[in-house]
Image (cartoon, rainbow, N blue to C red):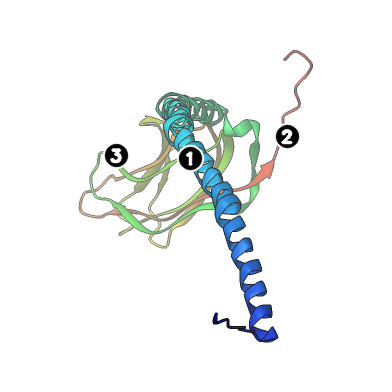
Amino acid sequence: MSNSFNISVKPEIAAAVVKIDAIKTVIDDIHNTDLLNVTNIVTTSYAAVLDIHDTDLPAAVVKIDANKAVVDAIRATDVPNIQTNIDANETKIDLIPTSQLYGVDPSSGIFVDSSGDDFGVTTDYVLIKEFRSRISATYDIEFKLLTENGAANALCQIYKNGVAFGTERSTNSISGIVYNEELHFTIGDLIQFWCKTDNVTYWACVRFAFINGVIVDTPVIKTLGA
């Protein structure tokens, strides 16, 4: 007599086995297909990165070095040349006589004020005040001259660049006499006040010196071709 067994599986277990088999199929498919694709993509990307590293980056470095050489050349050559041209043009501008741009109206206003006493105590002229003309113009020179004692004469004369230029003034007034004189000076000239006494016992004094005038615009009118 033979023995036989009839083992029945519950439907729930059978359904679970089916689902497990389906999941395993999906996993096998991912392993056999998608992972291989990912590996291929990674390999390809790595090759591209290596190509960038080995080829493109050195080429970029070469271009950077070339551009740096150009920049260095500009810094070393062009910038100094530009500065030289600027300096040269500034020099040309500086050489334009200011009198072509401005003028002085000597009739009003104090252009330079040198208040305060300056003395001549010898019988030889000595320089006591000095100014430099910044523009070419005629100035109204004004100063007050006096002596320490009426027994002596105080003398003063305007010089230009160390040479007598104006009218010699003389007074024995102890309260002082104011003198005015219009004189022309060019740009760069020294306007100088020289003073002396005719009696060394008493000093001569220039109490103040004014260079009168007001700077006014004087546009330069140039003709065609001038």
Label 1 amino acid?
A: Val
Label 3 amino acid?
A: Tyr
* Mark 2 lies on residue: 219
What residue is rendered at 51% in x and 47% in y? Answer: 39
What residue is rendered at 59% in x and 35% in y? Answer: 137
The answer for how far apart the CA atoms under marks 1 and 2 are is: 71 Å
Q: Quadrant of residue 189?
A: top left
Label 2 amino acid?
A: Pro
Picture coordinates of residue 216, whole percent (x, y):
68, 44
Vertical comparison of 106 with 11: above or below: above
Q: Which of marks 1 and 3 is nearer the N terminus?
A: 1
Vertical comparison of 189 with 38: above or below: above
The answer for how far apart the CA atoms under marks 1 and 3 are is: 92 Å
- In the picture as drawn, the residue positioned furthest to the top comes out as 225
Query: Which numbered mark, 1 or 3, is in the foreground of this view?
Result: 1
* Mark 3 lies on residue: 125
Q: Which of marks 1 and 2 is nearer the N terminus?
A: 1
- Is residue 117 in view? yes
